[in-house]
Amino acid sequence: MNSLILRPQYGARRAARRAVRGLLVLGAAALGFACTQVLAAQGAAVPGQPQLTVDSLSVVKVRTQAVRDARSSRSLGAEREGTGVVIDSNGLVLTIGYLITEAEKVELSTADGKVFPATVLGYDNATGMGLLRALTPLPVKPVDMGESGGIAERELVLIVGFDGVAPAYVVSKRPFVGYWEYLLDEAIYTAPATVNWQGAALLSREGKLLGIGSLVVGDALGTSANIPGNMFVPIDVVKPVLGDMVANGKSTAKPRPWLGVNTQEVQGNLIVTRVSPESPAEDAGLQKGDVIVGVSGAAIHGQKDFYTKLWATGNAGVDVPIEVLKGNQVQKYTLKSIDRDRYFRPKTVY
């Protein structure tokens, strides 16, 4: 009986792996042509010529040092490193937000080792994007924004990090649900997987910016196959908040309620895996191992449904009634939500 159930799953996974391998093999020549197109569009040399540097492709290395008592240091470390994408001639640099969360010191560097001081302009919790500004002019040509909504599956793309360029394919576009109270309605997934994806630029064949690197994932194709790849935040979700981030340091939209729970979805059940210290969840008495079963009296079915119902209760500061299974008993809690920005510690100002 079990073998009959498992064989179709195995067959689907094997077929998916074959499909990806076929893409990579059959598209090798086209991918080489695409790389040449992108490099030419960015004013860079073609692969194999020694004058090619990542500077030619609008990226810089980002190094940050968190404040001494940063709450994010436990999960992200006090010192962080990744890529930033130069998006204008005035030193604006877009990167993934976790690199600059609670950052006290920020440095940008080019491929020749030159270092440029920078400051954090803003962070947007909803998209997960961070914005920096170089304090002195950057000798890097800015990238042009693309239209991520128009990119299709099987499209040839380039992943450009501070340490080099990696060709890839878009293998899926679908929601991304993060265990840290984070949800993207549609993310871009690429394969094969590459290293140093944090903040990397996802470029189209025309050299346009399509997304910012966020994570390495084991399911780039979805649940049908265990194919490793990378997840990118689409540039189209960043565009609407970019002006606010420059002017105000964050979006002017009302902040969502934040509770401070990490969860894992297991067969539709939402198990608490971590409670942030001094968060609304800890204040209310939630603990690792609890199972969240409802919000405002309505049953929840997985992480995405939990976030949807949580954010529908109102803006940050609203009281959020939840139902939690502890042992074999369901208990009711009311959590006083907060704006997540208030949880992080600010940079010291003298």
Image: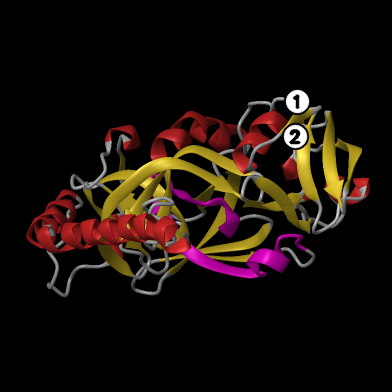
The residue singled out by tag 2 in the image is 257
The residue singled out by tag 1 in the image is 313
Instruction: Look at label 1 and name its amino acid.
Output: Thr
Per the image, label 2 sits on a secondary structure element best described as: loop
- The answer to whether residue 200 is seen in the rendering is no
Is residue 199 within the magenta segment? no
Q: Earlier in the sequence, mark 1 or mark 2?
A: 2
Image position, residue 190 (x, y; %): 33, 54
Which range is magenta?
70-99
Most foreground residue, 266 or 7: 7
Image position, residue 175 (x, y; %): 47, 40
Picture residue at 31% right of the left edge, 58% below the top: 11
Is residue 78 within the magenta segment? yes
Q: How many marks?
A: 2
Q: Is residue 32 left or right of residue 133?
A: left
Image position, residue 93 (x, y; %): 45, 50
Q: Note whether 149 is above or below 292 in the view shown.
A: above
Image position, residue 205 (x, y; %): 19, 48
Q: Quadrant of residue 313?
A: top right
Picture residue at 36% right of the left edge, 52% below the top: 221
